[in-house]
Image (cartoon, rainbow, N blue to C red):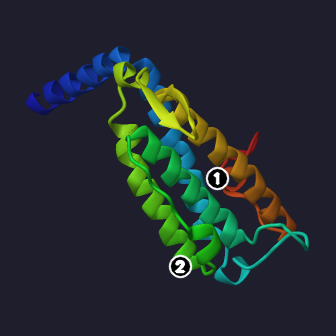
Amino acid sequence: MKTATIFIATVLGATVLSAQNPLSNELQQQYKATKDTLTKSADRMPDSDYSYKPTPGNTRTFAQVIGHIADVQLAICGAAKGEQKRGDAEMTKSSKADASAALKASFDYCDSAYDGLTDASATEQIKMFGGMRSRLSALYFNLIHDNEMYGQIVAYYRAKGMVPPTTADRPAMGKK
C-alpha cells in the first residue's frame, strides 16, 4: 500500500510539473526521440560504410554527416547555454568509433541545455549565428536540423539496401 501511494504521488507530481512547463516538456520529449533515432542510425551503420558517399563529388561521407550533426549541435546548444562551442568532427572523424563518439559527446553536451529548459527560460533571448532569438527557438532549430540530417541518413541507408531505424523499429502495420 505504501509503495502504491508513493507511485501515485510521483505520477501526480510529474503531471503537475509537466503542466507547468508544457512547451519545454514537449521540446524535451522531441529531443529525446531525435537523440534515440540519430544514435541508432550511427550505431547500425557498419564501420565499413562510414566512408560511403551515395554520389561522387561534394557529397558528404556517412561519417561526415554524423560529424556535421555533432558540430552543429555543439554550436547551437552552446549558444543556448551562453557559451561558444565549436566542433571539428565533420572534417576530422572518419571512422565509426570516432564519429559516433563525437555524436555522443554532442548529445551529452546538449542534454543539459534541454534538461534545464523551462517555459520561463525558453523565452530568454540569446545570441546565435549573429542574431538574437529565444532559447526555445534555438533548441527547436537544433531539432529541425537534426531531423533534416536524418532525412539524408535515410537516403544513405536506402542506397545501401538497409532499412533506416524509424522504419525498422516501427511495429508491423496490420500484422498479428
Q: Nearer the viewer, residue 46 or 72?
A: 72
Q: CA distance from mark 2 to mark 1?
A: 23 Å
Which amino acid, mark 1? Asp
The reply to whether callout 2 and callout 1 are in contact (CB within 8 Å) is no
How crowded pointer 1 is (Cα within 10 Å; few <14, some 14-19, many 20+) is rated as: few
Identify the residue shown where x is 33% and y is 15%.
Answer: 20
Instruction: State which quarter of the image contains the C terminus.
Output: top right
Res 13 quadrant in image: top left
For residue 11, above or below residue 31: above
Identify the residue shown where x is 64% and y is 72%.
Answer: 91
* Mark 2 element type: helix
* Mark 1 element type: loop
Which amino acid, mark 2? Ala
The earlier-in-sequence mark between 2 and 1 is 2
Q: Which mark is residue 169?
A: 1
Q: Which mark is residue 97?
A: 2
For residue 66, above or below residue 35: below
Q: Nearer the viewer, residue 112 or 10?
A: 112
